[in-house]
Image: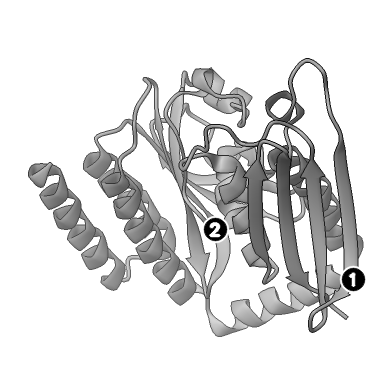
Amino acid sequence: MLDKLRRHIRILVDIGRLSVEDPGAERFLDQAVLQIARAVEIHHVKVLQYRPDTFHLLLIVGVGWKDGAVRTATLSADLRSPPGRAFQTAEPVSIRDFADQNEFVRSEFLAEHGIVAVSNVPILIGGAAWGVLEVDSTEPRDFSQDTTEFLTAAAALIGAVLRRGAHPDEHASLMAAVAEAKKGQILLREMQHRVKNNFQLVLSSISSIKHAFGAEGGRISVSLVGGVGYGEARLTVTDNGRGIQHPNENGSGLKLITSLARQIGGTVDQTSSDAGTTTTLTFPLIS
């Protein structure tokens, strides 16, 4: 364990040194993914950049992938995609083995390369998600908290270089393009896609029928009330099932709901008993 931590620190120093040498963003990324592969002792690493025009994450640099994959391979940015979840929630997402879970979908690209385990962290620029750093394993693997923290630190260095590499005129052009997109169909299509997927996943996470009820079935009620408190609304989902009998502190359902709520300045509260479960989301209304 101590040797691994020392290796992580040493390689973070190396990546930091590369970041101040100003070799150019593309060359820096090429070298950074190699260093990250060394640190995590893994054969597949990639940096994914979000493309709002297609609602995908584009593989812009990586190591271990088949020829032609870089700059052409894409992964979904929705919440059923591990890198998509990391991008949308701005939080790490790790999967020990795709075969042991049904919350996430393994992409055809990962299946083609025999990937069964992944760990993702968001790359942030100015507090907003720019893309994702992902490491991939062809064998089941428990990605430790130390590994997640290393990847988060490496992603922060990548974000700093990318932000520095944007020239003022490029930045102005980017801001103009974003403003234009907000007025056009690109943003509308993207938001419709996100709302649809987020709503479906949140509802399924809040009250899963197979866990809430027995063979006799039950009732789920959903209510949305505005004008709560000071300009807030409240979404309440209640069931009359058997309650949460064995709470899983490491479960991703409530974590996902809480993460999505934070993005809109909301809070989540959940109560459960043998008479049922009630989950409440309180969030500010946008005028």
Depth check, front residue: 102 or 226: 226
When asked about the image quadrant of residue 190, the answer is bottom right
Q: On the rendered structure, is 241 left or right of 262?
A: right
- 133 versus 90 height, above or below: above
Q: Are marks 2 and 1 in contact (CB under 8 Å)?
A: no
* Residue at 37% across, 50% down: 30
Dot 2: element: loop
Around disc 1, counting alpha carbons within 10 Å, would you say few (fewer than 14), some (14 to 19), or many (20 or more)? some
* Residue at 61% across, 42% down: 253
Task: Please give the label number shown on residue 90.
Answer: 2
Chain-order first, disc 2 or disc 1: 2
Name the quarter where the C terminus is drawn. bottom right
* Residue at 82% across, 48% down: 193
Q: Amino acid at mark 1?
A: Gly
Dot 1: element: strand
Image coords of residue 237 (percent x, y): 80, 48
Image coords of residue 208 (percent x, y): 72, 32
Q: On the rendered structure, is 118 left or right of 87?
A: left
Task: Please give the label number shown on residue 226.
Answer: 1
Name the quarter where the N terminus is drawn. top left
